[in-house]
Amino acid sequence: MTRSISIMAALLACLLTATTSLAQGLGNDSPDPTMVAHRCVAQMGEVADRTSAAIGDITQETIGRIARLDRAGASDEDIIAAGRRGTQAVANAAMAGTGRVSHIERHCVSLLTRLGADRALIHRVRDAAAGAREDIGMAGRRGVSAIRDAVARAIG
């Protein structure tokens, strides 16, 4: 569980840098909307990648914990509880990641609107955000499924 907390802390630190780095370099009076959109899309992609990696780490850690509990002869209740903690950690990571993507999307759309960007550019950012959220959701579903499979195998 300590490793899950460490992974979550690292994920949150990475997510916080996304907004900071997006804002850097945009301090001039009139940033180029195309460049803003490009940076927004890149930031959301990075958040999705980091979140998916964190979900994978949490999933593997949980599966390992379940296997160790099973080898040690732990009760079904203990194995199920470990699985539940793991699936909750996956859900928390996914929620944090999708929330971060949505935050970046709102910020970028607002900035692009203020800059008078054309609608196609704004749609590109919104589409990228939807794709990033879907990638995170898919990683979360895979993680939860893998953990549930491990629990089912362990309690046989």
Image: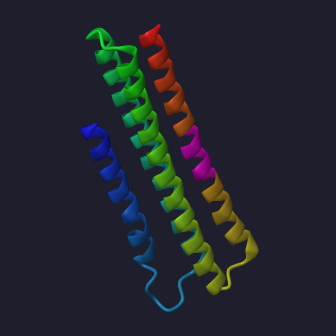
Residue 134 colored magenta? yes
Relative vertical location of residue 18 with respect to residue 75 in this rendering, above or below = below
- Residue 92 position (above or below residue 117): above
Task: Please indicate whether residue 67 sits to the left or right of residue 42 in the image.
Answer: left
Q: Is residue 18 left or right of residue 40?
A: left
Q: Residue at left 46%, top 25%?
A: 147
Q: How many marks?
A: 0
Where on the picture, by quarter, is residue 74? Answer: top left
Q: Quadrant of the N terminus?
A: top left
Write down the region rendered in magenta: 131-139
Residue 23 rendering spot, x and y as whole percentages: 43, 76
Nearest the viewer among 112 and 34 is 112
Residue 138 vertical position relative to residue 107 in the rendered view, above or below: above
Residue 7, horizontal then vertical, whole percent: 32, 45
Residue at left 53%, top 66%? 103
Residue at 52% of width from left, 59% of height from top?
99
